[in-house]
Image (cartoon, grey):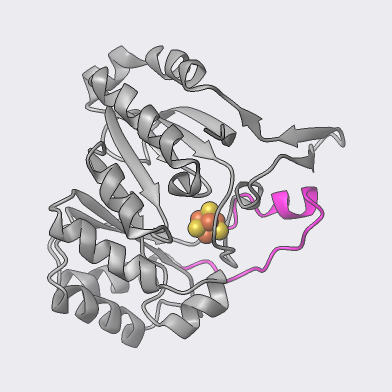
Amino acid sequence: MHVPYVFNIQHFSTHDGPGVRTTIFFKGCPLRCAWCHNPESQRFTPETMTNRDGRETIVGKQYTIDELMEDVMKDIIVYEQSGGGVTLSGGEALAMDAAYIRELAQRLTENEISVGIDTCGVVSTERIKAIAQHADFFLYDLKLIDDDAHRKYTGGSNRLVLNNLITLNDLHARIFLRLIMVPGVNTNRHTIQRTMEWLQNHHITPEQINLLPYHRLGMDKYSRLGRRPVLFNIPDDTLMQDIKTQVESYYDTVTIGG
Ligand code: SF4
């Protein structure tokens, strides 16, 4: 079993699924989204990042499953009281060693801790099906419905993303569909309409649609890694409300943020 690297463990998170959660951010992702606000999440191995005070730090640390369990169990009362739990995120949690992630999810469910999976969907369908048995819900990213545009802005095809979304929907998984909204990329009415029509034509029934406005927090991390960010415009409230209204003509449960 290959022990994956983790670049952050966030306690008391309220943005990674229901209730108050601990989010474990695994290091490594199959995509390279142009707007990614966690560039240190992309490589599968540790790397050096310069701190704001000029000192260097190594990003990426291995934890045994026992170590992670000990850490997340500290907040078990908080999960119980808030209806929260643990979310496995990244990077891409499902790109990590399959046996490791499965065992971690099993250990959490054995302890009656809700397991959320935050995924970009670029994983094999076998893995999606296998982890669905141990997951309470999925935070499922759908970035671009057009494959050429998906390749251009994320570095990979959306074929698996769409297929796996259909698979999870067929399994009646709880899906929180997360649509990042990046002006100039995917916020025009035609793109939203195409996305909604694809979802409806495939009878996708997410529990919620979360419209996530692009932001520039974390962009300083690119230069701290010796890289250059690509910057997009930040969507204003009017644009986000217009998109929400358009999406609500297809689905009932739509929120900005999530
Ligand atoms: S899928 Fe998420 S973590 Fe991976 S590159 Fe895109 S935004 Fe970053």
Q: Nearer the viewer, residue 244 or 104?
A: 104
Q: Nearer the viewer, residue 149 or 238?
A: 149
Task: Give the quarter of the image for residue 231.
Answer: bottom right
* Percent x, y of residue 203: 12, 70
The region drawn magenta spans 216-235
* Percent x, y of residue 237: 39, 65
Q: Is residue 113 above or below residue 197?
A: above
Q: Is residue 240 visible?
A: no
- Judge from the rendering whether residue 45 lies leftward or rightward of residue 170; answer left or right: right
Number of labels in the image equals: 0
Q: Main secondary structure of the magenta part?
A: loop
Q: Nearer the viewer, residue 182 or 62?
A: 62
Q: Nearer the viewer, residue 215 or 195?
A: 195
Task: Give the quarter of the image for residue 22.
Answer: top left
- Judge from the rendering whether residue 187 lies leftward or rightward of residue 153; answer left or right: left
User: Which residue shows up at 16% across the image and 66% down it?
Assistant: 204
Q: Residue furthest bottom?
A: 190
Q: Is residue 48 visible?
A: yes
Q: Is residue 45 above or below residue 248?
A: above
Q: Is residue 43 magenta?
A: no
Q: Is residue 136 above or below residue 106?
A: below
User: Which residue shows up at 22% across the image and 61% down it?
Assistant: 167
* Percent x, y of residue 136: 22, 38
User: Which residue shows up at 57% across the image and 33% down it?
Assistant: 8
Q: Is residue 232 magenta?
A: yes
- Judge from the rendering whether residue 180 lies leftward or rightward of residue 154; answer left or right: left
Q: Residue furthest right?
A: 54
User: Which residue shows up at 12% across the image and 62% down it?
Assistant: 252
Q: Is residue 230 above or below residue 217?
A: below
